[in-house]
Each structure stands twice: as C-alpha cells, then as structure tokens.
C-alpha cells in the first residue's frame, strides 16, 4: 500500500507553501501599492531600494511557486503509486484465495486423520501416537510449501519458509521445519546444526526482547549498520531479505510424564528471499495467517513427540 505518512507530510508541506505564497503575494501587492501611491503624491522615494525590494519579493514568490508545483507533482505521483499498489494488492489477494482454500481443505483432512489415529485407533486397543505425529509433521511441511507459494506471489521471487525454535535457557536456535523446495537446496545437515540464539538478531529479539515481528528488505545494509546478525556465514548466498513472526504456543504438561514442555521454547516462522518485498501490510497479514495456521499443529507435534 502507499506510504500514507509520506502523503500526509507532502500535503502539509503543500499547505504551508500555499499559505506562504499568499502572504508573499499580498506583501508584494502592498509594497507595489505603497510605492505607486507615494510616487503619485510626489513624495520622496528611494527608488533603487524599492526596486530591490520588489525584485526580492518576486524572486521569493517564484521560488514558493516552484516549491508548490514540486509538492503538487509529488502528491500526484504518490496517488498514482497508491493506485498501482491497490491494484497489485487486489491481484495478489485473488491469486492467494485458491492457495488458502486448498490449504483449508487439506487441514480438515489432516485433523480428521489425527483424530482417527489418537482416538479411534486407541479405542481399538492399537498404539497410534507415532502415526499421528508423522501426520502432524507432514502437514506442517505442506503449510510451509503453500506459504512459500503465497510469498512468491506477493514478492515475485522464490521464497524459503522455515519454522525455528529458540531455547532461551540454553541460548540455542534450531530449524525444525522447512518447505520442501528450499530443503533440497539448503536443508539437511545445515538445518541440523544448532546455532547460538544471541548471534541471530531477528530471532533473539523475538524470543528475548519479545518484539512482535521482524522485517527487513535489505539485510546487507542492515548488517553493515550493525542492525542485523546471522550465525551462518553463508546467509548472503541464499537471501537478502526476511520476515519473521512468532508462533503463539502456550506451555503445557505431558499427561504421560508430567514434564512441562514448551515453556522455554519460542517458535517462529521465517520467510526469506533475495529481492525483498516483505515490508508491506499484506506480507505481514500473510505471515500472521500462516503463524496461526501452524500453531495448533506445532503444539500437537511437540506433545506427541514426548
């Protein structure tokens, strides 16, 4: 969407310039009237000083009108940008509808299968925790696949989507889920490596400082300013932009072991690409939607894993 704050600043500047132009025009007219009146009555007038004053007023007035035209042009261009952005927004939403509709149908099937494994199988005296766990994990990956597809529509670039888990007590961070396409390119052993949470600023800020989300369309610039850190030395090879959002999951206890789980863990969903395009309202709404979609499944998977 357009920068409404910028638009308002331009409008305010435009109003000030218009007012100043009116004042200057009035002063010029007044000075001219005074000069003509004095001359008509034959009073002594310093003609050279008066001419200089009038010229100064004309120059200032010209400059003010130039400023007015520039601000008017900026308003017009901003309105065009907003119109284009609104059109792109509508197109993106239309393209996203089938993505989320298909995902909703798939989630319903997943919920049904988990119910069958956990309840119907148990009524028949069969152990079914592991199959239910596998179903939950499989569907989480499916959601990430669809999220990668959705963000490609929004950013016009290939996107990787992961779910990371931060352990505040041990200052560690691990990638626990990844979409299938990026998994083939950079997953595997790379994701199995445990990282230091404090060396990854976006995740550390979310897990420790509790910021609501992190978004940056130019990580290289942020890195040079000391506003971004990453424990992986090869991050530039894969991305230069990211958006990160926490996955809200409340701590609970296992009915079988009584152990408290998820209390020291912060889950978050991360999307990255090369081009950027995450600093938009629809990108933030989309990652919130994905976060809400995976929340219950991540909780189920963690509880079934115990």
Image (cartoon, rainbow, N blue to C red):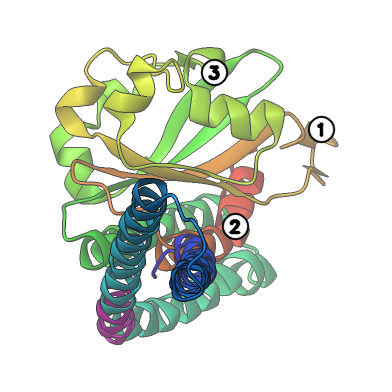
Q: CA distance from mark 1 to mark 3?
A: 24 Å
Which quadrant would the N terminus be assigned to in this image? Answer: bottom left
Task: Decide which of tag 1 and tag 3 comes sooner along the chain.
Answer: 3
- Please name the residue shown 52% across and 59% down the image: 294
Residue 305 versus residue 134 in the image, above or below:
above
According to the picture, the residue beneath numbered tag 2 turns out to be 295
**Circle 1: element type:** loop
**Circle 2: element type:** helix
Task: Decide which of tag 3 and tag 2 comes sooner along the chain.
Answer: 3
Q: Residues within 10 Å of mark 1 (few under 14, many from 20)?
A: few
- Please name the residue shown 30% across and 82% down the image: 83
Q: Nearer the viewer, mark 1 or mark 2?
A: 2
Q: Name the foreground residue: 144 vs 231.
A: 231
Q: Are marks 3 and 2 in contact (CB under 8 Å)?
A: no
Residue 11 versus residue 207 in the image, above or below:
below
According to the picture, the residue beneath numbered tag 3 turns out to be 197
Q: Name the foreground residue: 62 vs 28.
A: 28
């Amino acid at each position: 969407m357009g920068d409404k704050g910028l638009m308002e600043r331009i409008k305010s500047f435009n109003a000030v310039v218009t007012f100043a132009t009116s004042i200057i025009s009035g002063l010029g007219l007044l000075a001219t009237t005074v000069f003509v009146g004095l001359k008509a009555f034959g009073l002594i007038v310093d003609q050279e000083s008066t001419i200089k004053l009038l010229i100064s007023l004309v120059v200032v007035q010209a400059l003010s009108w130039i400023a007015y035209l520039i601000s008017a042009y900026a308003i017009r261009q901003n309105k065009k940008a907003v119109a284009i952005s609104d059109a792109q927004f509508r197109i993106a939403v239309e393209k996203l509808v089938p993505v989320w509709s298909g995902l909703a149908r798939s989630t319903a099937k997943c919920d049904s299968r988990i119910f069958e494994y956990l309840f119907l199988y148990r009524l028949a005296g069969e152990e079914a925790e592991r199959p239910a766990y596998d179903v939950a994990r499989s569907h989480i990956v499916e959601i990430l696949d669809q999220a990668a597809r959705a963000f490609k529509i929004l950013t016009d670039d290939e996107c990787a989507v992961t779910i990371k888990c931060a352990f505040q007590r041990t200052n560690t961070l691990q990638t626990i889920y990844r979409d299938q396409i990026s998994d083939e390119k950079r997953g595997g052993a790379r994701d199995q490596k445990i990282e230091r949470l404090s060396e990854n600023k976006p995740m550390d800020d979310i897990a420790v400082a509790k910021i609501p989300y992190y978004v940056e369309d130019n990580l290289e610039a942020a890195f040079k300013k000391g506003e971004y850190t990453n424990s992986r030395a090869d991050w530039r090879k894969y991305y230069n932009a990211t958006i990160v959002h926490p996955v809200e999951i409340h701590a609970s206890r296992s009915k079988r072991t009584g152990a408290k789980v998820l209390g020291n863990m912060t889950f978050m969903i991360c999307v990255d690409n090369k081009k950027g395009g995450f600093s938009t309202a629809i990108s933030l709404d989309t990652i919130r939607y994905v976060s809400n979609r995976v929340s219950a499944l991540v909780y189920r998977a963690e509880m079934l894993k115990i």
